[in-house]
Image (spheres, coloured by chain):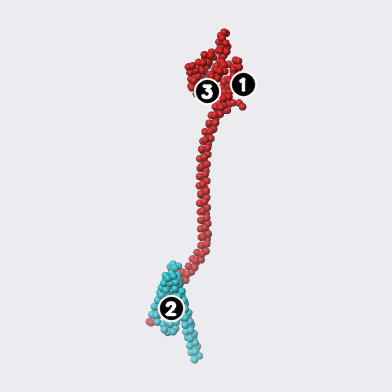
Chain colours: A cyan, B red
């Protein structure tokens, strides 16, 4: 159970420790990729709570979303249209939806526990 | 087994996510810092650049002025050297002319001729035919000038362009000053030329000798003559 958190910390540490620098031009891509990853993670958590979690869907969604978002941004750059805003908008919307779902589910879980206690 | 596999995959995903997050955070922070530094420095850089350009322009202009001034100085120097040369020549010429006219004392090699009345005068003859007359002196002086004498003096009195020589009985008045015989005529000039021009056969000396005048002629290495008074 603690393994994912441990790896998250390791990832953060690695990110802070690496002294890589990318051109300013690609900072848009990075933020979009992070947004996509965050969205997928939250989606995965929600699916887990709803007992619909499929690891293949999760993994493919995680990387596919990132790649898609980056490609969209790239195309937008080439066309001179800020298409990455569409990705930001879509992912933002979905993040909020996922958070809302998780919240609702947590409330339900808590209510069930209280009901169980009352029944006892 | 299935649970463990799920956790492993989640862990890997989390690793990737965490890495990206941290990396992006760091990158954005660096970017912001750079931007701030840039915007703060840009004004300064622009200001200093502007100043530098102005200084360079000033320097350029001043250099130009220096070049111009140097050129002017050169020209002035050239003119001055020319002028001094001309002036030196003019001064020399003026001195020459002054010496010739008699405004300056002169000295130099020359000859002298002394004329004496004849010591022996036969009683039956006219005395006038045996003494030195002004015309003899005129003739001598004219001959000397013709031969290139630069300055002539009689008994130490210099002859100028407006001098007059007159016979007053046994004495001769030069510009009002009377001198008795013997008369010593000095001339500054080329000694050889002067002497030979006087000694030509049928020349001045012959004529004077025919007029019973005792003549002595000789060279003098240094003759001094005063400037004209007044």
Q: Position of residue B89 (x, y in %)?
A: 52, 33
Real-space Cα separation, disc 2 to disc 1, in angstroms:
144 Å
Verify CB contact (< 8 Å) between mark 3 and mark 2. no
Residue at label 1? B176
Residue B124 position (above or below residue B14): above
| Residue A6 visible in rendering | no
Query: What's the residue at 41%, 75% (across, down)?
Result: A68
Chain letter of mark 1 equals B
How many callouts does the rendering have?
3
Q: Secondary structure at mark 1?
A: loop
* Local crowd size for mark 1, using a 10 Å CA cut-off: few (<14), some (14–19), many (≥20): few
Real-space Cα separation, disc 3 to disc 2, in angstroms:
135 Å
Quarter holding residue A21: bottom left
The N terminus of chain B: image quadrant: bottom left
Q: Are marks 3 and 2 on the same chain?
A: no
Query: What's the residue at 60%, 15% (across, down)?
Result: B169
Checking the image for residue A66, the label placed there is none
Q: Secondary structure at mark 3?
A: helix
Verify CB contact (< 8 Å) between mark 2 and mark 1. no
* Local crowd size for mark 3, using a 10 Å CA cut-off: few (<14), some (14–19), many (≥20): some
Q: Are marks 2 and 1 on the same chain?
A: no
Chain letter of mark 3 equals B
Real-space Cα separation, disc 1 to disc 3, in angstroms:
22 Å
Residue at label 3? B145
User: Would residue A63 be found to the left or right of residue B149 on screen?
Assistant: left
Residue at label 2? A40
Q: Position of residue B167 (x, y in %)?
A: 59, 17
Between disc 3 and disc 2, the foreground one is 3
The C terminus of chain B: image quadrant: top right
């Amino acid at each position: 159970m603690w393994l994912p958190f441990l790896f998250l910390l390791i990832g953060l540490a690695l990110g802070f420790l690496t002294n890589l620098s990318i051109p300013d031009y690609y900072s848009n891509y990075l933020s979009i990729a992070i947004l996509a990853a965050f969205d997928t993670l939250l989606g995965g958590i929600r699916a887990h709570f709803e007992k619909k979690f499929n690891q293949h869907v999760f993994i493919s969604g995680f990387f596919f979303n990132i790649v898609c978002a980056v490609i969209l941004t790239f195309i937008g750059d080439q066309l001179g249209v800020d298409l990455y805003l569409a990705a930001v908008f879509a992912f933002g919307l979905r993040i909020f939806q996922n958070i809302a779902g998780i919240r609702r589910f947590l409330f339900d879980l808590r209510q069930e526990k209280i009901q169980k206690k009352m029944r006892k | 087994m299935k649970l463990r596999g799920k956790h492993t995959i989640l862990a890997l995903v989390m690793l990737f996510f965490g890495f990206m997050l941290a990396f992006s955070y760091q990158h954005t922070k660096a970017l912001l810092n750079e931007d701030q530094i840039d915007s703060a420095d840009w004004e300064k850089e622009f200001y200093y650049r502007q100043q530098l350009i102005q200084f360079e322009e000033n320097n350029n202009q001043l250099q130009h002025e220096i070049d111009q001034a140097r050129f002017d100085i050169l020209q002035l120097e050239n003119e001055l050297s020319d002028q001094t040369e001309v002036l030196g020549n003019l001064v020399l010429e003026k001195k020459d002319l002054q010496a010739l006219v008699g405004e300056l004392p002169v000295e130099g090699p020359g000859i002298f001729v002394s004329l004496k009345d004849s010591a022996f005068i036969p009683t039956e003859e006219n005395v006038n035919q045996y003494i030195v007359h002004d015309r003899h002196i005129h003739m001598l002086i004219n001959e000397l000038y013709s031969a290139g004498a630069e300055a002539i003096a009689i008994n130490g009195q210099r002859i100028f362009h407006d001098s007059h020589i007159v016979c007053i009985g046994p004495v001769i008045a030069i510009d009002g000053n009377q001198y008795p015989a013997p008369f010593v005529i000095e001339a500054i000039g080329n000694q050889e030329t002067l002497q030979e021009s006087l000694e030509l056969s049928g020349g001045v000396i012959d004529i004077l000798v025919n007029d019973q005048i005792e003549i002595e002629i000789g060279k003098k290495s240094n003759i001094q003559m005063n400037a004209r008074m007044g």
